[in-house]
Amino acid sequence: MRIGELATRTGVSVRALRYYEEQHLLASERSTSGQRHYPDDAVDRVLLIQQLYAAGLPSRSIVELLPCVVTGEVTPELLERLSAERDRISTQIGSLVNTRDRLDTVIAEATATFRTGTPCR
């Protein structure tokens, strides 16, 4: 598939796909006219890259982790890195849950204030 179709199927901009190639996160073959062509599994790879970016991983870390995620190729160092990233994400999730719970409290108090006309503490 061409770059525009990959962009449409993944919801990622053409510019971002080009950046992924520059960072060696994604590969394409070039036609004789220079157009990029991607295999069908590029959709899953782009979606994975997006998830890893959303989890806070920089492109250099993603490049290191992709072989393990995609092919199962693993070293003890890579396994340790994956575990560390998982732990970091778990900590981040815990922090987000605490923030959400705090916002729920603020919303409940503000709603009560709005309905009764009594000020928040």
Image (cartoon, rainbow, N blue to C red):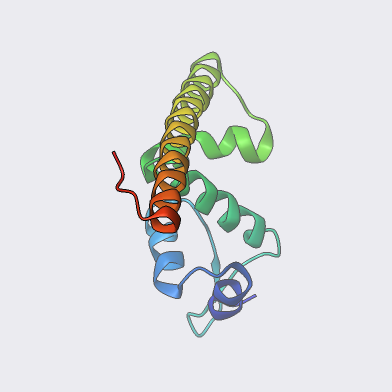
Q: Residue at x 36, y 55 (%)?
A: 117
Q: Residue furthest right?
A: 40
x then y, percent, for residue 34 = 48, 80
Which of the two residues, 107 or 83, is positioned nearer the viewer here?
A: 107
Q: How many marks?
A: 0
Q: Residue at x 41, y 43 (%)?
A: 103
Q: Is 33 drawn above or below residue 72 in the view shown?
A: below
Q: Residue at x 63, y 29 (%)?
A: 73
Q: Is 77 drawn above or below residue 99 in the view shown?
A: above
x then y, percent, for residue 119 = 29, 48
Q: Quadrant of the C terminus?
A: top left
x then y, percent, for residue 99 = 41, 37
Q: Quadrant of the N terminus?
A: bottom right
Which of the two residues, 96 or 57, is positioned nearer the viewer here?
A: 96
x then y, percent, for residue 79 = 55, 19
Q: Is 84 drawn above or below residue 64 in the view shown?
A: above
